Image: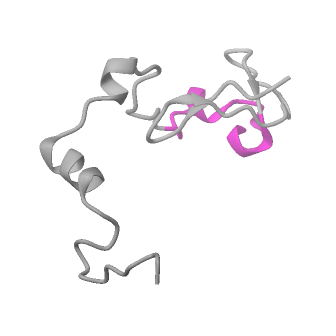
Amino acid sequence: MRCHVRIGQLVSHPCARTTHRRCRQCGNPTCERHQAGKGGDCVVCTGDHVPPSAPASVTLEEMLSFTDAEVAAFDAPAGARTGKLRDMDS
């Protein structure tokens, strides 16, 4: 089994480390990192875990939404901002 504690700052996802044991309170499988000491409770039940603020899922539209500055950065030739352009043919 894999740990069910949700982690991730950019994209929220289950931890998925190998399960150490099940939480005594909620019964969810948790890895050793997400167990709160020897009592058998997980860090979620003890309040020692702050769930990630990232959404559990992101739509394709959200992933492909760019600001004008981001689009301009992708459109600029490599090195344009540093002034270190070089001719690749030489």
Please, is residue 83 above or below residue 29 in the view? below
> What colour scheme was applied to this rendering of the protein?
one colour
Please, is residue 44 above or below residue 35 in the view? above
Q: Nearer the viewer, residue 20 or 60?
A: 60
- Residue 82 placement, left or right of 47: left
Residue 47 pos. (x, y %)? 51, 34
- Residue 61 placement, left or right of 45: left
Residue 14 pos. (x, y %)? 63, 27
Q: Nearer the viewer, residue 29 or 1?
A: 1
Residue plotted at (29% across, 63% down): 77
Instruction: Using the rendered image of the protein, determine whether residue 51 is visible from the camera's viewpoint.
Output: yes
> Total label count?
0
Instruction: Using the rendered image of the protein, determine whether residue 36 is visible from the camera's viewpoint.
Output: no
Which picture quadrant has residue 4? top right
Residue furthest front as drawn: 89
In the picture, the quarter occupied by the N terminus is top right
Was residue 42 drawn as part of the magenta stretch in this picture? yes
Give the magenta part as a residue range: 31-49
Residue plotted at (48% across, 33% down): 11
Was residue 17 drawn as part of the magenta stretch in this picture? no
Residue plotted at (86% across, 35% down): 20
- Residue 20 placement, left or right of 12: right
Residue plotted at (15% across, 50% down): 69
Residue 18 pos. (x, y %)? 84, 35
Which picture quadrant has residue 37? top right
